[in-house]
Each structure stands twice: as structure tokens, then as C-alpha cells.
Image (tube, rainbow, N blue to C red):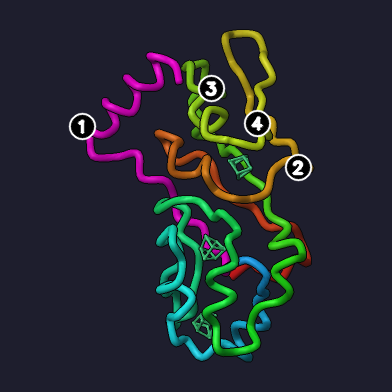
Amino acid sequence: MTCDTVDIRRRNLLRGRARPSRPSIRPPWSDQNSFTSLCIRCGKCGEACPEGIVGAGDGGFPEIDFLKGECTFCGDCAAACPAPVFGDTAGNPWNAVAAAGASCLSAQGITCRSCQDSCDQSAIRFALAPGGIARVLVDGQACTGCGACVSTCPVGAITIQLHAGDGHAA
Ligand code: SF4
Ligand code: SF4
Ligand code: SF4
């Protein structure tokens, strides 16, 4: 993490901002149809999640809040579910990748590498451009959609995007 990044975080904290926008994603190994037709909204998946990232969203249906942490793909949510909502946890949890929005500081010429620093998959790199600008590039093959980079962004520029047809989007 750079000194500039630390300064930006501290400044934003003092100003009471830096709360990233909230993504709306269901727990892994499930899809939207499962929730509307099969989820009984018991909340057991949220109680089981050791990361505390599964909570009740609109209508009481569970959704992931990456502002609270990352998904480690432990499978505890699926194991706790009494309904046939979840698929095989040995399979792909979701087709989700991180993306940086327009508020990204690096894209505005301000030094920040917070998202890259938080990514254990080394899925984030930066493309340098004239004027001190660096654009976030996410390797869609390496990114697991874990969300670890979401809460670390000081300006909430990172969101987790679901691929079309994935079925996880709310
Ligand atoms: S897989 Fe584990 S960390 Fe991820 S949402 Fe489910 S319980 Fe939480
Ligand atoms: S444990 Fe299963 S049925 Fe209960 S709220 Fe979570 S997904 Fe829905
Ligand atoms: S979602 Fe996870 S794997 Fe993907 S870029 Fe962010 S930290 Fe890396």
C-alpha cells in the first residue's frame, strides 16, 4: 500500500465518506430462481457464514455484502441451508469478477493500489497512461469474485459484476 493510499483513506474517514456502493449478489452456488422459488428466508446461511457477509436483502432474501468482507468459498452457507437452494459446492461458485468504476483514484491520476494489494489471486494490474493515469485491469480468468478488493477501495470504485446468464444477480 502506498503512503498516498493511506493519506486518502484517512482523509476520507475524517470526512465521513468512502462507503462503497453496495453490490447485490446472492450466496455462491445458488441462482436467482432458487431464491424466488425455493428459499424460505430462514437466515441460516447468514448465521453460518464465518465472514459475516451474508445478510437479509430485499424481501428478506439473503445477499452478500462485500463491504463486510470477502467470500472464502468455505461452503458453510450451503451446508446450513435446509432448502434445495444451493448447487454442488465442488463446482464453480459463481461467474463474478471485479470491476473498477469511474471514481477510481488511479484513473484520475491519484496514486492508489489498494485493490491490487488486497487481491490474493494477483488478478488486478494497472495499465499506465499519459498524465499519471493508471487504469485497473482485472484478469477475468484469475478473479474469483471473492470481493476482497471491494471494501478496501477508499472511494468505493470496485464492484463485483456478474456475467450475463449467471443467474446470481438480484
Ligand atoms: S461460502 Fe463461506 S464465506 Fe462465502 S458466503 Fe458462504 S459461508 Fe460465507
Ligand atoms: S439457509 Fe437457504 S432457505 Fe434459509 S435463507 Fe439461506 S438460502 Fe434461504
Ligand atoms: S474479487 Fe477477489 S480475486 Fe477478484 S480482483 Fe477482487 S480480490 Fe482479486
Residue 162 position in % (x across, y down): 68, 57
The CB of the residue at mark 4 lies under 8 Å from ligand 3: yes
Q: Which residue is mark 3?
A: 106
Q: Which residue is mark 1?
A: 14
Task: Decide: is 153 above or below 25.
Answer: above
Query: Which sits earlier in the primary sequence, circle 4 or circle 3?
Result: 3
The front one of 138 and 164 is: 138
Q: Residue at x 59, y 50 (%)?
A: 146
Q: Residue at x 40, y 21 (%)?
A: 5
Which amino acid type corresponds to the residue marked 3 in the rendered image? Ser
Circle 4 Cα neighbour tier, 10 Å, few/some/many (<14 / 14–19 / ≥20)? many
- Return the residue found at the far top: 131
Q: Which residue is mark 4?
A: 124
The front one of 147 and 36 is: 147
Residue 140 is left or right of residue 37, and the answer is right
Magenta residues? 1-27
Q: Which residue is mark 2?
A: 140
Q: Calculate the distance from the C-alpha at mark 3 to the C-alpha at mark 1.
A: 21 Å
Quadrant into which the N terminus falls: top left
Residue 85 is left or right of residue 149, and the answer is right
Task: Decide: is 168 above or below 106.
Answer: below
| Disc 1 element | helix
